[in-house]
Image (tube, rainbow, N blue to C red):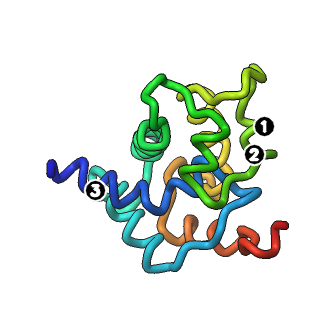
Amino acid sequence: MNPRIARLAAVAAVASVALLAGAAGAQQASPDAVRKAFAAADANGDGYLNIDEYVANVIYVFRDADKNRDGFITEQESIAYSAMHSPERFRSADRNGDGRLSVGEAVAIKVIDFFEIDTNRDGVLSVEEVLAYERSLPAAGARR
């Protein structure tokens, strides 16, 4: 497997929750899993995730979740892809109300999250910021 694809696949395993469930429905990942995913997403190896690296991962996860390859994620695909699917988060991301997410809608909602995670407002994410964000998410059982 292409090393870049392998790295992105590793990131997708953890990041799928972030894309499809979002902050409202995500389950906390282990710190080791977050660190591993972070390192894999850090394409330029500088120890930070810039917006380009972050968006590239969102697009990769989107493509992975779009099982029928029609360029959209339906709520059914979202549910099948992530046990932490949040109907509220899905509807919020579905800006045009057509019942499916385009890659643009998915990226838009996640860009907002990027700037929430970037607590020191330096334009990049550190692993510490991502870990703090993960700790702030409700546990899977607490959200129901």
What amino acid is at disc 3?
Arg
Residue 4 visible, this angle: yes
N-term mark: 3 or 1: 3
Q: Position of residue 111 (x, y in %)?
A: 60, 40
Q: Residue at x 78, y 37 (%)?
A: 92
Relative to 5, residue 139 above or below: below
Is any atom of residue 114 visible in this view?
no
- For disc 1, the marked residue is 92
Picture coordinates of residue 61, whole percent (x, y):
45, 45
How far apart are the alpha carbons under marks 1 and 2?
5 Å
Determine the secondary structure under disc 1.
helix
* Mark 3 to mark 1 CA distance (whole Å): 29 Å
Residue at 77% x, 46% y is 87
User: What is the x, y in percent for residue 96?
Assistant: 75, 20
Q: Which residue is mark 3?
A: 7
The answer to whether 55 appears left or right of 24 in the picture is left
Residue 77's image quarter? Answer: top right
Q: The disc labelled 1 sits on which kind of residue?
A: Ser
Sequence-first disc among 2 and 3: 3
Q: Residues within 10 Å of mark 1 (few under 14, many from 20)?
A: few
Q: Examine the image and state in which quarter residue 120 appears.
A: bottom right
Compared to 44, does 101 lie above or below? above
Q: Residue at x 54, y 51 (%)?
A: 81
Tag 1–tag 2 contact (CB < 8 Å): yes
Residue at 59% in and 35% down: 106
Viewer-proximal residue among 39 and 88: 88
Quadrant in the picture for residue 73: top right
Residue under label 2, please give it. Answer: 89
Label 3's element? Answer: helix
The answer to whether 32 appears left or right of 80 in the picture is left
